[in-house]
Image (cartoon, grey):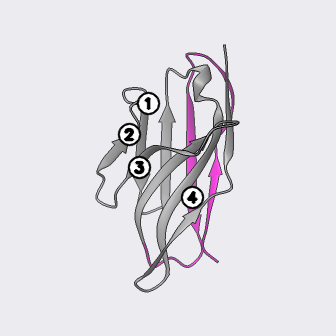
Amino acid sequence: QVQLVESGGGLVQAGGSLRLSCAASGIIFGINAMGWYRQAPGKQRELVASISSGGSTNYADSVKGRFTISRDNAKNTVYLQMNSLKPEDTAVYYCNADMAGRPAHFYNYWGRGTQVTVSS
């Protein structure tokens, strides 16, 4: 069973840093784009950052210059380094990836989410 498992969330003061990790597990024949989304209470889920299989990155304007997405293809893992955190970054952060549990059959998967809380 292919799945994504996030870790690294928690409570941090404004200006602090956190590093999120998301590991894909199961029998995986390939992973294309991976990304991080977040959803704050009462708001829609939004894209935070994404990274292609080749390493090209894309960021939401609100996190540019503060967050860095990276991936380790050998470990089937994507990371989100979050610096200079602000209270408005408080949300549940979800990992997302296009993965193939069977050869050439790619589907979109979501992790269960990890809470990030930034206190002022």
Sequence-wise, which precedes: disc 2 or disc 4?
A: 4
CB atoms at circles 2 and 4 under 8 Å apart? no
Residue that carries the numbered disc 3 in the rendered image: 50
> Could you tell me how far apart the alpha carbons at marks 3 and 4 are, in whole angstroms?
15 Å
Q: Secondary structure at mark 4?
A: strand
> Could you tell me how far apart the alpha carbons at marks 2 and 4 are, in whole angstroms?
20 Å
Crowdedness near tag 4: few (<14), some (14–19) or many (≥20) residues, C-alpha within 10 Å: some
Mark number for residue 59? 2
Q: Is residue 32 above or below residue 90?
A: below
Residue that carries the numbered disc 4 in the rendered image: 23
CB atoms at circles 2 and 1 under 8 Å apart? yes
Q: Secondary structure at mark 1?
A: loop
Determine the residue positioned at 41% across, 46% down: 70
Viewer-side label of 1, 4: 1
Q: Secondary structure at mark 2?
A: strand
- Say if the magenta span includes residue 25: yes
> Could you tell me how far apart the alpha carbons at marks 1 and 4 are, in whole angstroms?
22 Å
Which image quarter holds the C terminus?
top right
**Amino acid beneath label 4:** Ala
Image coordinates of residue 15 in percent, x first then y, are 55, 16
Crowdedness near tag 3: few (<14), some (14–19) or many (≥20) residues, C-alpha within 10 Å: many
Sequence-wise, which precedes: disc 3 or disc 2?
A: 3
- Say if the magenta span includes residue 84: no
Residue that carries the numbered disc 1 in the rendered image: 63
Q: Which residues are magenta?
A: 1-30
Q: For residue 61, what is the image quadrant? A: top left
Q: Secondary structure at mark 3?
A: strand
Seen from the viewer's position, the closer of residues 38 and 12 is: 38
Determine the residue positioned at 49% across, 41% down: 80
**Amino acid beneath label 1:** Val
Sequence-wise, which precedes: disc 1 or disc 4?
A: 4
